[in-house]
Amino acid sequence: MATIATQDRKVLRELAKRVAEIAELPAMAARRELWRRSNQLDSARPMILVFPEGSWRELLPASNLVCEGETARAYEAGLRGRIFYHEHLRDDTVIERDLVVDKVIHSTGWGLEPKQIPSTETLGSWAFDPVLNEAADLKKLHSPEITHDEAEEEERLGLAQDLFGDILDVRLKGVAHVSFHLMQQYTSLRGLNQAMIDMVAEPQMIHDAMAILCEGNRRWVEQLEEQNLLSLNNDGTYHSSGGVGYTAELPHPDHDPNHIRPRDMWASAESQELAQVSPDMHAEFALAYERQLLEPFGLAGYGCCEDLTLKLDDVMAIPNMRRVSISPFADVEKCAEKLGARYIFSWKPHPAHLTGEFNEDLIRAYIERTLEATKGCVVEMILKDTHTCDGKPERFTRWTEIARELVDRVAA
């Protein structure tokens, strides 16, 4: 069992106390309510979320951590990240007074594991190394089997309770972020170029693969439910490709708090790999299968970086659809006209604005254009895929200040 050194323990408890103080601020309760309204399509104003993602190594470099133990450093990074949000990002992130310990869940895998050819440059692009080379290889795929290690998680839970239990609300949580990536799974095994060719040359191979992957993902959810490993995500849980789950619509009124079902939860899907294919191909090779996986859930989201401008009719045909990703490459005017106030317009501003020349006038005009185009829509602004800020963390702060200024003007 992991142990925490006395000095590390002191550092972590002080950080936890600061998180607890932030969580009790009136602003957090106000944000929580704004998220509930927005997610239930009763929007008071556009919401703002910032996810530094790859830029965290520039905002909070590992060299800034003071704890020495590996487990302690992991806790420290998480706590400092939450404090950083409050002190520097000032978006609509809700800092909760909790410390989540994940249930320990293992999977046997799919039978075939993706391979990659690594880049020769630091943070460079890798290349596909296909392992699915012909239709016969599909026989090597099988549904993953799920197991639950209660002994290991009890140790982790005990450690967290001992360390933080009198300061934060320590709680055990199962799978709460449910997202399906069938085409990503296929291309990781087949290669992206070959997958594009398959749509014309080997369409049946793709359909056969999608059927296997769809059934495997369905079985994954089924096993999680059978083993009571699903947890509610109607809280600050990250949903889809950006956004959070706060809503009073979930769980379902007849739910059992001790046994969560898919209908009590949000889920999502995306097919970024199909960004350049036609709406008909996207619907045939992806949405037909993704819809089967999403329909059992209470609410759903769709999309990530793929431009859905011409594909929205098919996405909106999913009965429980609520959150739709509008990528930096989408036509915001056309998407706003389609979605109206019937869905969450989950807009992803271009992250490249945080690199190179930081042009505040350009950023302001860019955001203003979208806010003007989406009047009457339920908008959330999700800054993500931010792989670098050129070592200038203050750019995140300033971007958020500009966004907040413009959002407040809309709400006034």
Image (cartoon, grey):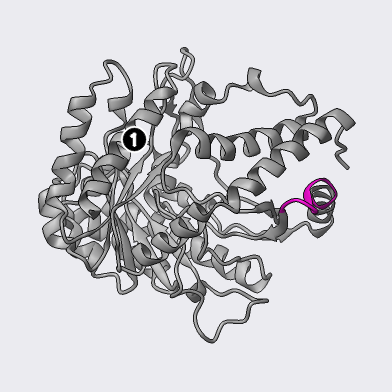
Side (left or right) of 357 relative to 361? right
Residue 273: x and y in percent read 31, 43
Residue 167 in the magenta stretch? The answer is: yes
Q: In which quarter of the image is residue 342?
A: bottom left
Is residue 400 visible to the viewer in this orientation of the structure? yes
Number of residues whose C-alpha sits closer than 10 Å to that of mark 1, classed few (under 14), some (14–19) or many (20 or more): some
Q: Quadrant of residue 132?
A: top left
Give the tally of numbered discs.
Answer: 1
**Amino acid at dot 1:** Glu
Residue at 39% from the left image edge and 29% from the top image edge = 396
Is residue 134 visible to the viewer in this orientation of the structure? no
Segment colored magenta: 161-168
User: Compared to 173, does 327 lie above or below?
Assistant: above
Q: Which of 360 and 105 is in front in this view?
A: 360
Residue at 46% from the left image edge and 63% from the top image edge = 246
Residue at 44% from the left image edge and 63% from the top image edge = 33
Q: Quadrant of residue 82?
A: top right
Q: Which of 73 and 130 is in front in this view?
A: 73
Residue at 44% from the left image edge and 71% from the top image edge = 297
User: Compared to 147, does 399 lie above or below?
Assistant: above
Residue 101: x and y in percent read 71, 52
Q: In which quarter of the image is the N terminus?
A: top right
Residue 175: x and y in percent read 60, 59
